[in-house]
Amino acid sequence: MTFDRLSWPRRTERLTLRPAETPDLPAVFAIRSRKEVAEWMPNHPTSYDEWLLKLGPVGVDRMLVIDLYGVVIGDLYLHVVDGWAQAEVKEVATRAQAEIGWCLSPDHQGHGYVTEATTELVRLCFEDLGVRRLVANAFADNVPSLRVMERLGMVCEGRFRSESLHRDHGWVDGITYALLRADWEG
């Protein structure tokens, strides 16, 4: 539903961003099933069919692919939600916030692709969708993702001690970064 409100594809200097389609999913699975990628993802998919079942239509509806000259090199996550509001003003908070995320093939890391793609995603959220607040979450030890958040101008709003259970590292700290449209415009 979110993506239907926009025109596609979106192009940056080197990349094309567009909603994921069924033919893109094997490439996304191939990236996400790599051990070094799955370390920081919510799950480590080992079977394409199982991954598709867990992803479901809702997961596909929140996924944009990062396309580099016709090759899917990663994906972006976008989930637009209502902000919390008191009953008398709840309509003002409709679709006012979004959570964003990203995943990039290790074969294409170190070239600024994630920063380029997420910068366009932030612009799209604030300018085209009218969102007023973005959040991104990560394990505190996922330093590359924290760097992306900081490059986007996001502010660390909280470090939550031992609140995330990692499959290999046990209980670890989680981090939430956010960016307000007013800060982004300033």
Image (tube, rainbow, N blue to C red):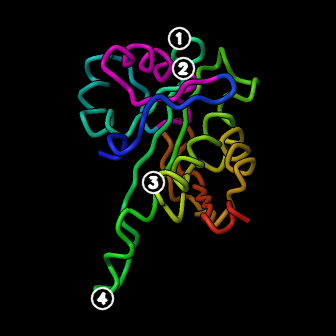
Q: Amino acid at mark 1?
A: Gly
Front one among 101 and 116: 116
Disc 2 on helix, strand or loop? strand
Q: Residues within 10 Å of mark 4 (few under 14, many from 20)?
A: few
**Which residue in the structure is indicated by mark 1?**
70
**Which residue in the structure is indicated by mark 4?**
88
| Residue found at x 49% / y 51% | 128
Residue 136, numbered circle = none
Q: Residues within 10 Å of mark 3 (few under 14, many from 20)?
A: some
**Which residue in the structure is indicated by mark 2?**
67
Disc 4 on helix, strand or loop? helix
The magenta span reads 15-41
Measure the alpha-carbon separation of dots 4 and 3.
23 Å
Measure the alpha-carbon separation of dots 3 and 2.
22 Å
Q: Amino acid at mark 2?
A: Asp
Measure the alpha-carbon separation of dots 2 and 4.
43 Å
Q: Residues within 10 Å of mark 2 (few under 14, many from 20)?
A: many
Classify 24 as above or below 135. above
Label located before the other in sequence (1 or 3): 1
Q: Residues within 10 Å of mark 1 (few under 14, many from 20)?
A: few
Q: Dividing the image into 4 quarters, which one contains the N terminus? A: top left
Residue 129, numbered circle = 3
